[in-house]
Image: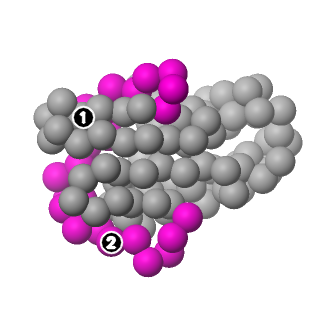
């Protein structure tokens, strides 16, 4: 299973952010703090600070919940490999790709 083809996070505001599109805009992303988003089991996330809401695919939800909790990358990989029964090397490659997309669209910094 290749996780990079599955994680999708859509930011519902003036403009949607889809991780599948390289041309995603970074407008208004400087004020985003994913630590303030509360995630539900169905993939719905709400940021009470900004009023924005998000929808996430199952794999994106695992990653976003972990990031919101401050979980380190090795433990995120553990969660992905356990939940989706994917090889660790595949999960690691695809997690890095997903995190790079989050940086690209301004939803996180490279330090995360």
Q: Position of residue 7 (x, y in %)?
A: 60, 49
Say which of 62 and 12 sits in front: 12
Which structural element holds mark 2?
loop
Mark 2 crowdedness (10 Å alpha carbons): few <14, some 14-19, many ≥20? some
* Image height of 92 relative to 36, above or below: below
| The magenta segment | 20-43
Mark 1 to mark 2 CA distance (whole Å):
19 Å
Indicate the colouring scheme. Answer: one colour
**Magenta stretch, main secondary structure class:** loop
Q: Residue at x 56, y 55 (%)?
A: 98
Q: Residue at x 66, y 28 (%)?
A: 79
Residue 27 figure quarter: bottom left
Residue on which disc 2 sits: 25
In the displayed structure, 99 sits above or below 78; it is: below
Q: Position of residue 53 (x, y in %)?
A: 30, 40
Q: Disc 1 designates what residue?
A: 47
Q: Is residue 13 visible?
A: yes
């Amino acid at each position: 299973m290749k996780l990079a083809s599955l994680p999708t996070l859509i930011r519902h505001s003036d403009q949607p952010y889809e991780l599948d599109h390289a041309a995603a805009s970074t407008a208004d992303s400087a004020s985003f703090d994913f630590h303030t988003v509360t995630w539900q089991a169905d993939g719905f996330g709400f940021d009470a600070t900004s009023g924005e809401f998000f929808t996430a695919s199952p794999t994106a939800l695992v990653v976003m919940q972990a990031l919101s909790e401050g979980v380190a990358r090795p433990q995120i990989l553990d969660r992905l490999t356990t939940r989706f029964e994917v090889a660790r090397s595949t999960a690691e490659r695809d997690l890095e790709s997903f995190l790079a997309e989050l940086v690209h669209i301004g939803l996180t910094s490279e330090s995360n």
